[in-house]
Amino acid sequence: MRRYGKHTDEDDIRSRPNRKGNRPRTHIRPKHEDAAEGMVLTVDRGRLTCLVEDRVVTAMKARELGRKAAVVGDRVALVGDLSGKKDTLARIVRIAERSSVLRRTADDDDPYERVVVANADQLAVVTALADPEPRPRLIDRCLVAAYDGGLEPLLVLTKSDLAPPDKLLELYGDLDIPYVVTSRAELESGEAVERVREQLDGRITAFVGHSGVGKTTLVNALVPEERRRVTGHVNAVTGRGRHTTTSALALPLAGAEGWVIDTPGVRSFGLAHVDPSRVIHAFPDLEPGTEGCPRACSHDEPDCALDDWVAEGHADPARLYSLRRLLAARERTDGD
């Protein structure tokens, strides 16, 4: 039965009253053209601490961002209360495109990758030369993650008073990675801190390393006004230390321009997300030789064109060995 005539008017249409008295929902979202720009400093249970100009602001992610998550280092746009006063809350309405990402998976069988840090320029891989012993395979995995994510690696070797660095440096010599060697005495005197600071000046640097290597101690020395609790305890049985950092935190570098991002100590570094075709970009002397490789070449198989490229004298064989060692790290466990 026809309820309305042929010529209906809007006033003739009965509408259900809105008992809540609010406006009907719409798919049109505001553009937030007046949003302020900020940087994410740390994330804790859905609350994000951001730096907006010279103010530290607590914020939460806006619903319209959906499942997209903001991480430490992200450049974001915020609206709401940006005063930074106690018990105030802003909203993150946009996340800018990232220039780099440091990603990892829980293990090599985990398909879910986690973005640890965004927009960092370099990755400082901190490892002790003794107590605990170095773990080259874990270092290899960190380097692969750096190359894959667009970060330049930096090796920071601590506790040189307990063991010499020569053997470990020889292992990575063909990769031309910058490095800094420190000792406990040099850290106490500040000499080592200045050498590390020179490598960080003007850059955003993420620090990564397994527990007990002195990573957080070094960060505290670089950012003395942001002292953080350090246990300094290393398990005598496993050789591994307690975690002294529980979440990533960005801190302004003292005495220079730049940022230091301290990340939690890692016991493993899964690389399930890494595509070997992206790692080759970190080897510009080898990359042209891949043009003759078969489709989806792993660069470590009989038909790989890199063997002929090196045999013809276009690159040093040691560089190809280093590339294949790093790619093989994806297939190995993190243990020594």
Image: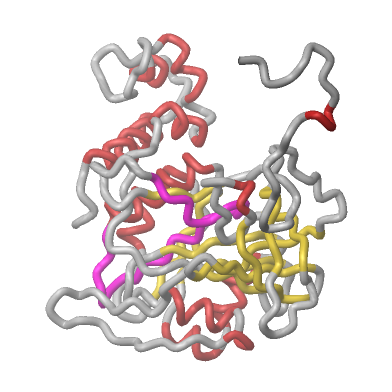
The quadrant of the rendering that contains the N terminus is: top right
Count of numbered tags: 0
Residue 299, how many percent across, how many down?
34, 23
- Where's residue 231, x and y in %? 35, 88
- Measuring from the top left, give residue 121's x and y in whole percent: 62, 53
Does 1 sit left or right of 80 as displayed? Answer: left
Residue sitting at 55 percent across and 88 percent down?
227
Left or right: residue 328 versus residue 182 is left
The residue positioned 56% from the left and 69% from the top of the image is 47
Residue farthest toward the front in the current orientation of the protein: 1
Please tell me which residue lies in front, 263 or 50.
50
Residue 44 seen: yes
Quadrant housing the C terminus: bottom left
Rendered residue at 67%/42% (across/down): 16
Residue 114 is inside the magenta segment? yes
Is 215 above or below relative to 149? below
Q: Is residue 280 magenta?
A: no
Q: Which residues are magenta?
A: 113-135
Q: Quadrant of residue 9?
A: top right
Q: Is residue 173 visible?
A: no
